[in-house]
Structure formats: structure tokens, C-alpha cells
Amino acid sequence: MIRDYHSDDCDEVLRIWLAASIEAHNFIDAAYWEARVEDMRTVYLPAAESRVLVRDGRIQGFYSLCENVLAALFVDPVFQGQGVGSALLDDALQHRAPLSLAVYKSNTKSARFYRSRGFLVVQEQGDPQTGQDEYLMRSS
């Protein structure tokens, strides 16, 4: 079931965000992500419209939208490869379309996922916070 995010989901969503961020972005020091947990809690999650996928009473992933931007889509590493990301993306596209997003070029797994779902690279840019190159992608 995919449902709206509630404030009491915060700790579990942050746990998933941190674990998945460190795993997917192993080209960025883990300390970078760890230093941003409080910003996620106090700035980014409250500013976004977020939804969570719950199975067997456990949050397995979430996404966050800021207008027509998919600001986050993270799946607990334990549940990756089980269709959670696809279900979350489908739900996001039902709420907003077209969507745009940014994904690090070095995160080839995620870039490939979005391409397979019809997203196209519309621009390459640098992320000033990390110094990493990223793709700006848009759904077709």
C-alpha cells in the first residue's frame, strides 16, 4: 500500500534515506550524507509532499515531490530489486506529470532505472554541494 507520509514515519524514512544514499552514492563520502540527516528532518521532508510504500507493516521506500520535481525516491536496500521503486515512481507519476529529477551521473543504477521508465536526459550539470556531475531528467 502506498499512502501519504505522516510525521511519525520520519525516523524510518530518514533511516531508509541514509542507508540508501550511502549505498547508491558510494562515490561521495558517507559523512556527507550523515551530516544532512537533520536538514532532511527539519527542512526537506516538511517542505515536500511525500508518500511511503508499506508492506507487512514496514515502510519499504518513499518518494518526495516539490511541485513537478521528484526530489527523492529511496528504497530500503533490503527491498531493492523487488518492484518497490517502480511502484513508487508509478504513484508519483499519477500525482504529477511530467516529472523532472536530478540524478548523479555516477549513480548508473538509478540513471538506468529512470531511463528504462521513459525519462530522458535533458541537461548535464554540476551539483555545487558535492562537486559531482548529474543528469537533469524529465519524464516523456
Image: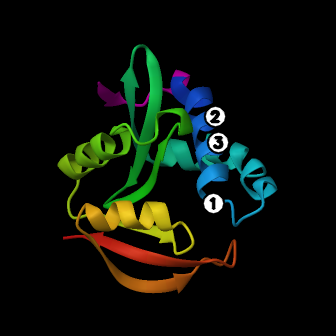
Residue at the extreme top of the image, as rendered: 57
- Indicate which disc residue 19 carries: 3
Residue 109 location (% of width, % of height): 47, 61
Determine the secondary structure under disc 1: loop
With 131 as the anchor, is 1 left or right in this view? left
Asked whether 71 or 103 is in front, the reply is 103
Q: CA distance from mark 1 to mark 3?
A: 10 Å
Q: Earlier in the sequence, mark 1 or mark 3?
A: 3
- Few, some or many residues within 10 Å of mark 3 (<14, 14–19, 20+): some
Which residue is more in the foreground, 36 or 134? Answer: 134
Label 2 secondary element = helix
Tell me which segment is drawn in magenta. 1-8
Q: Label 1: which residue?
A: 25
Q: Position of residue 36 (x, y in %)?
A: 72, 51
Q: What residue would you read off at disc 2?
A: 15
Quadrant housing residue 91: top left
Quadrant where the N terminus sits is top left
